[in-house]
Amino acid sequence: MILHPFPYQLYLVMSEADCKGRNFLHVAEQAILGGVDVIQLREKNTDTASFLTKARQLKEITDQYSVPLIINDNISVAEQVNAAGIHVGNSDAAPVDLRQQTLLREKIIGYSIEYLSQLDNEQTAVSDYLGISPVFRTDTKTDTITEWGLDGIATIRQLTEKPLVAIGNIHHGNAREVINAGADCLAVVSAICNAPDPQKAAYQLKNEILK
Ligand code: TZP
Ligand code: MG
């Protein structure tokens, strides 16, 4: 699937654990009602059977609202739930190989960028969007390499026309400047999953993007 122009602006990345004891399906639904356009299920340290169960549950919610569900780095889960796409990082399955899988050929493939050199590679060429990972340092994911910052987004923006999804410590206080720097879409975990009111948090983020 070639997403041109990129139709999403607010992207929720979540695991059950990210919701810290709250019902993740309820958080997802509230987030959608607040304006989230796309959801990625990113289960780390979870076996495939349990990942699949969660993905099936979440897919019921996302389907109700026609919101695409993206699966982080698990081809089997992505295929079994007929997800809208898959997201991978630099050390995961390669987008070029994913694109060759019959069931993923027409799906969204997202690819996280941690080095500028990745912009020129064939993996970027076959991906539908690039994750700018992370924009700011975050406690949610600490095994990261490059903290891109606003300048990094601006640099990448000049080097590629691929849709850019910014992630890493984005919240409603910095959302506008991340968009101004050149991001097409903002991805968040804690700004929504840990918000007292996930629907309101999504709504406020979306408002900043649309300003
Ligand atoms: N990839 C890069 S940073 C990150 C991921 C999955 C976590 C972002 O979480 P938060 O809570 O929005 O900073
Ligand atoms: Mg990964």
Image (spheres, rainbow, N blue to C red):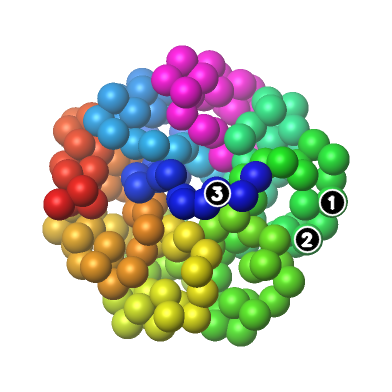
Q: Are marks 1 and 2 in contact (CB under 8 Å)?
A: yes
Q: Quadrant of residue 1?
A: top right
- Residue bearing mark 2: 96
Please state the extent of the stretch shown in magenta in the rendering: 45-71
Which element carries disc 1, helix, strand or loop? helix
Q: Position of residue 158 (x, y in %)?
A: 43, 80
Circle 1 residues within 10 Å: few <14, some 14–19, many ≥20: few
Q: Which mark is residue 3?
A: 3
Q: Is residue 53 magenta?
A: yes
In the rendered image, the vertical position of residue 155 relative to residue 64, given as above or below: below
Residue at disc 3, CB closer than 8 Å to ligand 1? no
Please say whether residue 189 is visible from this viewpoint.
no
Is 22 situated left or right of 72 in this image? left
Q: Position of residue 54 (x, y in %)?
A: 57, 26
Which element carries disc 2, helix, strand or loop? helix
In the rendered image, the vertical position of residue 77 relative to residue 120, given as above or below: above
Label 1 and label 3: CA atoms lie apart by 18 Å
Name the residue type under label 2.
Val
Label 2 and label 3: CA atoms lie apart by 17 Å
Label 1 and label 2: CA atoms lie apart by 7 Å
Q: Which mark is residue 153?
A: none
Name the residue type under label 3.
Leu
- Residue bearing mark 1: 100
Nearer mark to the viewer, of 2 and 3: 3
**Residue at screen point 14% across, 58% down:** 173
